[in-house]
Image (spheres, rainbow, N blue to C red):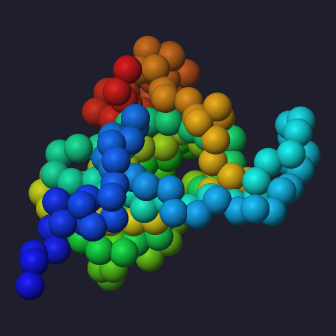
Amino acid sequence: METQNAAYWIKHLQLQPHPEGGYYKEVFRSAMDVVRTTSQGVKQACTSIYYLLEGEDYSGFHRILSDEIWYFHKGVPLYIHAIDTEGNYVVHELSDTITGNLSVVIEAGQWFAAEIPSADGFVLVSCAVAPAFDFNEFEMAKREELLAKYPRHEGIINKLCRE
């Protein structure tokens, strides 16, 4: 039997590199449309992806205009770091351990990033976004701008910002 490591899942699920770090594949895009009251236009109701991180790679700080729910599948614990619109910082553990949660919600507009705290192994998750994910609503954080707005979170911003 083939070892189910990161390389196995990347190949088996046909994952591609993601701009924020890690690998992904969209597996669902709703045919149903919804109207978001905070913006103009109609959007698809929901999207879902597989997402994989391994070793020292990380998902750099970014934000989207929709809520995102992360679901744990396989691997080691994952930390999801979030800074809300008031500047409050929280770290969520996504895992099947006693200290973790099998799902984590990141609300629309929050800056967030993810890493494997052990910097070893891999983690496979799914992310559901509603209303649907759209790269036009995806914003990678710029380190200097985040530091200017949230200087008290300098350590984690410097660690997990890509730009």
Q: Position of residue 68 (x, y in %)?
A: 59, 56
Q: Residue at x 43, y 62 (%)?
A: 50
Q: Position of residue 161 (x, y in %)?
A: 36, 29
Q: Quadrant of residue 52?
A: bottom left
Q: Quadrant of residue 123?
A: bottom left
Q: Residue at x 64, y 59 (%)?
A: 29
Q: Quadrant of the N terminus?
A: bottom left
Q: Is residue 120 left or right of residue 101?
A: left
Foreground pick, 153 / 73: 73
Q: Residue at x 23, y 44 (%)?
A: 57
Q: Position of residue 28 (x, y in %)?
A: 58, 63
Q: Residue at x 40, y 72 (%)?
A: 72
Q: Quadrant of residue 6?
A: bottom left
State whether residue 101 is above or below residue 32.
below
Foreground pick, 79 / 38: 38
Q: Is residue 108 left or right of residue 26?
A: right
- The answer to whether one can see residue 87 in this image is no
- The answer to whether one can see residue 102 in this image is yes
